[in-house]
Every structure is written in C-alpha cells, then in structure tokens.
Amino acid sequence: MLSTVIERRYGVLLEKFLVAKGSWREFGDFSEARVDNLHPSIDRSKLNVRIQKMKGGKGGKTVTVITGLNLADAEAKALLKQLKKHCGTGGTIKPNLLELQGDKVETLIDFLYQQGYRPKRSGG
C-alpha cells in the first residue's frame, strides 16, 4: 500500500526526472576544444607565460603556478586537463592562473614549449 501511494505521489516527478536525465552528461567533453587550435590568430610565442613554484598558504604543500596564458574558460579547462594528464597530478583553475600540485616546473616548461608557447621560469 505504501509503495502505491509513493508511486502516485512521486511517479510523475520521477518520470520527469528520468526523461530530463536522458540528455544529461555528468562530465563535460572537452575534446572539441583542442589545445592545438585554441588561438589560431594569436602567436603563442608572444605571450608572457610564467611558471613558478609556490609554497605559501598551501599548508606546506608545493604547487606549480602558470600565469599569462590569457585563455577563455573552456580553453583553460582543456589545457589544464592535458597538463594534469601529462604530469600525472591534480590541478585547478583560479582567476588568471592554472595551478598544479607538486613541483612540476621543468615538466611544464617542456610541455608548453612543445605546444608553441615560450614559457619562462619565475621566482626562485
């Protein structure tokens, strides 16, 4: 009896939820925003890209910070996804910078150089 009451009361809502979920995807597909074609008109080698290792305010943990890329949100997400995969570490997007866990300065300089950027080490 209780199950029939629940079905009557919530059946319509459940039906609407299941129908709406059909086109829903949990994780975005960033394969459309390939890093190779992000800014075809902008010369990547002219950007002032800086990579530095930081420790302050992170609970003693070291992070690598990339600044100066000037990317749109979707482009930054696509690049960060490739960087995290290449370095085998986690990372996040913050306003005007990308942050990766650990000391990955040399790895990131090599990777970004291969992508057409001319990054420079910043800080100590």
Image: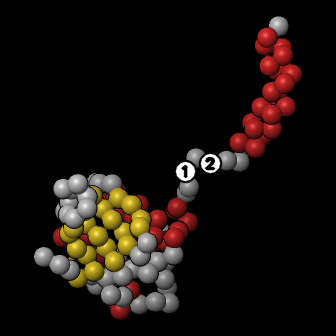
| Residue at x 55%, y 50% (from the top left corner) | 27
| Residue at x 34%, y 77% (from the top left corner) | 67
Reply above or below: 83 against 35: above
Residue 18 position within the rendered picture, expressed as x and y whole percent measured from the top left: 75, 36
Mark 2 and mark 1 in contact? Answer it, CB < 8 Å.
yes
Residue 52 position within the rendered picture, expressed as x and y whole percent measured from the top left: 22, 73
Residue 31 position within the rendered picture, expressed as x and y whole percent measured from the top left: 52, 62
Cα separation, mark 2 vs mark 1, equals 6 Å
| Residue at x 86%, y 22% (from the top left corner) | 8
Quarter holding the N terminus is top right
Q: Is residue 91 left or right of residue 58?
A: right
Residue 34 position within the rendered picture, expressed as x and y whole percent measured from the top left: 48, 69
Residue 25 is tagged as 2
> Mark 1 highlights which residue?
27
Q: What's under tag 1, amino acid-wise?
A: Phe
Does residue 82 appear in the picture of this structure? no
Q: Is residue 11 left or right of residue 84?
A: right
Closer to the camera in the image, 107 or 71: 71
Quadrant hosting residue 96: bottom left
